[in-house]
């Protein structure tokens, strides 16, 4: 029987967090570049932000319940620092140069969490 390596069973949560973050960043970029006018539906960016924060929190919780434990914990630890810029965004205002910079500060952690969640865990 060949050795099958398992990915974390929480990988769909990390994918969802990455998709929510990417959609939110894409919408914010399009609005900033004046490609899209969201004056009639500003709530969409806010809804995507809430979805991003919720899915990031759910994915980080995989450290407690995900299997295999080491892979889930590694992915959750890689994603956890994204909570700092995500939590700071509402307090920094949305009409300054800081807003996109702080929002982009979460990107490396979102990507790292996704990659770690999809990488097969080594069985020992």
Image (spheres, rainbow, N blue to C red):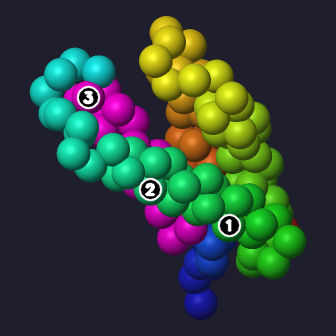
Q: Residue at x 21, y 45 (%)?
A: 40
SS label for mark 2? helix
Q: Name the residue under label 1.
A: 58
Residue 43 falls within the magenta-colored stretch: no
Q: Name the residue under label 3.
A: 31
Quadrant in the rendering for residue 64: bottom right
Q: Is 89 or 8 nearer to us in this picture?
A: 89
Estimate the x, y position of residue 43 in percent, counting from the top left: 38, 51
Relative placement, left or right, of 22 versus 99 is: left
Q: Which of marks 1 and 2 is nearer the N terminus?
A: 2
Q: Is 89 or 16 nearer to us in this picture?
A: 89
Numbered badge on residue 47: 2
SS label for mark 3? helix
Q: Is the magenta stretch mostly helix, strand or loop?
A: helix
Q: Earlier in the sequence, mark 3 or mark 2?
A: 3
Q: Is 116 or 63 nearer to us in this picture?
A: 63
């Amino acid at each position: 029987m060949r050795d099958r390596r398992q990915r974390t069973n929480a990988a769909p949560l990390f994918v969802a967090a990455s998709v929510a973050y990417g959609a939110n960043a894409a919408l914010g970029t399009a609005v900033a570049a004046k490609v899209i006018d969201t004056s009639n539906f500003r709530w969409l960016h806010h809804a995507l932000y809430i979805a991003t924060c919720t899915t990031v929190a759910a994915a980080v919780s995989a450290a407690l319940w995900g299997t295999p434990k080491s892979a889930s914990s590694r992915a959750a630890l890689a994603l956890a620092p994204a909570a700092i810029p995500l939590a700071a965004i509402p307090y920094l205002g949305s009409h300054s140069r800081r807003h996109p910079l702080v929002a982009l500060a979460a990107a490396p952690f979102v990507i790292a969490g996704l990659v770690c969640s999809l990488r097969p865990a080594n069985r020992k």
